[in-house]
Image (cartoon, rainbow, N blue to C red):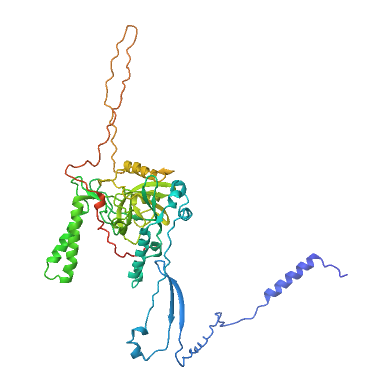
Amino acid sequence: MRPRRPRFQIALFGLMTSLLLSGCPGPRFSNVNLQTPTPSPSPTPTPTPTPLPETYVPYSHKEVAKLFNGFEIHSKVDTDTGAPAWLERKAPESYVLDLDVRVRVPQAAQTIEQIAQADGQLPTLLPGLVSLLGASRVSNFYHGLYQLKVDSLSRTLNRLDQLLSRHNFFDCNTILELTDPKTSRKALLIQSDMDVNADGSDADRSNDVDGSTSNFQPYTSYRWPKRSDKPSQFIPEREQKLKQAETEFDQKSTTPERKKVLKEQIEELNREISDLKKYSFLISKADPFVVLPGFMLRQGNHPFLPKFGDYVVVIYGGKLYPAIIGDAGPSYKVGEASLRLATQIDTKANAYNRPSSDLNVTYLVFPGSAESQSGPPDLPKMHDRCAELLNEIGGYTGELWQWQNIFATPTPTPSPSPTGTPTVPTTPGTSPSASPASSIAPTASPSPSAFPSSPSASPKSAAHHVPRKRPEKEEAPEGD
């Protein structure tokens, strides 16, 4: 065994080693470049050119895409060998786009199971519906609606941006004709979504109507003679436009083509100003009303013909909402209601945001139920009348909404008149004390009607109003 060295020897050896290493200078370098040398760039390889074809090879390619309006596009490019270009340029069939639109037209829901798929609460809310469906029929209004949708597609095939959107094509689940065998009461059951109509104005009730939204119109198809001399807030703007159009029309430099356009504008502005001076209309934010396709209101002697002013019960989310038919819309779209209805269903609804995009809104239209004289909606009467109509088709359960008049001015309770403190007779030995006076506030008298009938106004039947303010032109498709 090797003897162990003392600890001091080990420490001494380590110290000597450190001194020797520190005393030996290392190698010296001069003019050393410490930067990493930049490598010389590699030469860019010359790409190999794609071999050119020796002759033309026929080609075929398929693509699948989706348009903004919901159409799925199946595109295909097929080529073939043709004649020289100077001949093919003159041949129309040498450069062709074949546009083939295939659409499945839906069948109307008719059984209670099919209808309940859209709204499972409907059979409970309308207990008589099951028996009514046994003798119901799909209305030709439904078939007419989808025929008009297909016609719209055919007319706009050359403008893909104007094709009816998928959402608007499939916007109606059913239109059924119901008749109660006991009461003979007729009803149209429509299942659809709900878009928003923000139109209408009535200076007699309010001049605080927002007309800034796009496509706003200050009138509705349902109207009645004005009952005051309050002017419409929308007249001055139209009078100014009328003056400008007439000035341009009278200028010698105006071309005949431009004069033709100006003449139509002048006639339309004159009609609008005249209507706004003579009539009042529904107000979207205040009045619960629905909009039906225009063609449904022009079917003459149809046994289920709806008319302006007819009562409607809108069913959504377990509640029933009284309303009337107040306006006509494009004939190829269904499912639209006023702001008052829309915001009750969804507080975020507005002119650009529909309250329901699903087909879970039911509109029960009661043909022939309009009042004999048109006028601003009587909301308590609307509630009671809709309750009667529902009871005539088997009754209802749940809540039938009671609308409140948002323009009604509550009558303030008058403050009690100050009364003096009566002096109480005293007797010897007692000190006089004041008896508190009884201050009974007088009962407030009921507020007078906000819309007194003018003797000179002779209300007309709402059924005779013709929807002219919303022409059924092609509109830009809406998104889903």
Front-most of 199 and 474?
474
Quarter that holds the N terminus: bottom right
Total marks shown come to 0
> Where residue 465 sits: x, y (%)?
24, 53
The residue depicted at 27 percent of the width and 25 percent of the height is 418
Quadrant for residue 359, please give it: bottom left
Quarter that holds the C terminus: bottom left
> Where residue 61 sits: x, y (%)?
46, 80
Confirm whether residue 98 shows in the render: yes
Q: Seen in the image, is 166 located left or right of residue 330?
A: right
**Looking at the image, residue 37 lies above or below residue 296:** below
**Looking at the image, residue 319 lies above or below residue 245:** above
Residue pushed farthest top?
428
The residue depicted at 34 percent of the width and 7 percent of the height is 429
Quadrant for residue 427, please give it: top left
> Where residue 346 sits: x, y (%)?
40, 51
Front-most of 131 and 457?
131
The residue depicted at 32 percent of the width and 12 percent of the height is 432
Residue pushed farthest bottom?
54
Front-most of 190 and 7?
190
Confirm whether residue 347 shows in the render: no
Quadrant for residue 294, please give it: bottom left
The residue depicted at 42 percent of the width and 45 percent of the height is 394
> Where residue 373 sits: x, y (%)?
25, 46
**Looking at the image, residue 61 lies above or below residue 240:** below
Front-most of 75 and 472?
472
